[in-house]
Amino acid sequence: MPKGLILDNFFPYRLTQLQATISDCIADIYTGKFDLTRHEWRVLAILGSSVEMSAKQIGLLSNLEKMQTSRAISKMLNEKLVMKTTNLNDKRSALLKLTPRGLSVYQQLVPKVITREQELLSVLTQEEQHQLFNTMKKLSLQSQSILKKENNN
């Protein structure tokens, strides 16, 4: 008879719980004064790190569904945090970039979220942080490999 599932020992469950707790810890920064949702924060962070990109690209990078991405972008357009420009390579789609106001919000948030990240990681030595990032990379590659293999069957 197979052994029962003990959630507290099940890696995906523990990882999801950790992710939720860390997300809440970071969200505390951008939800208050800046009144951003998690989805809007993801869009802001992505656009702050790049020049211009399509909503589809943002959705892929942020792991958001099409509707979540669309709603976040719509609100950010209304709030004048993001603006649309014509995609010269594909007239059917628009490119998005931060407005000066959006860039200002991004520049105010980045030091705060980096400080929070450092605070979170401060319980780990430099070696442990290096091991953590290597482990995360290995697990990501393994997950992708499994999915690719499953999709080819």
Image (cartoon, rainbow, N blue to C red):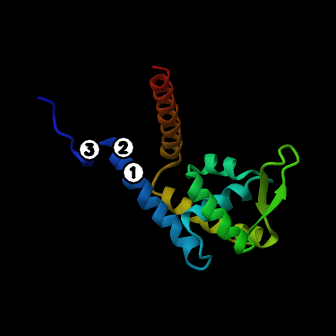
Where does label 1 land, which residue?
Answer: 16
Relative to 18, residue 106 above or below: below
Q: Quadrant of the C terminus?
A: top left
Amino acid found under the numbered disc labelled 3 = Asn
Where does label 2 land, which residue?
Answer: 12
Where does label 3 land, which residue?
Answer: 9
Label 1 to label 3, Cα distance in Å? Answer: 12 Å
Q: Residues within 10 Å of mark 1 (few under 14, many from 20)?
A: few
**73 lies left or right of 20:** right
Relative to 20, residue 103 above or below: below
Looking at the rendered image, the disc whose residue lies closer to the viewer, 2 or 3, is 2
Amino acid found under the numbered disc labelled 1 = Thr
CB contact under 8 Å: marks 1 and 2: yes
Q: Quadrant of the N terminus?
A: top left
The residue at 50%/21% (across/down) is 152
Label 1 to label 2, Cα distance in Å? Answer: 6 Å
In the foreground, 108 or 58 = 58
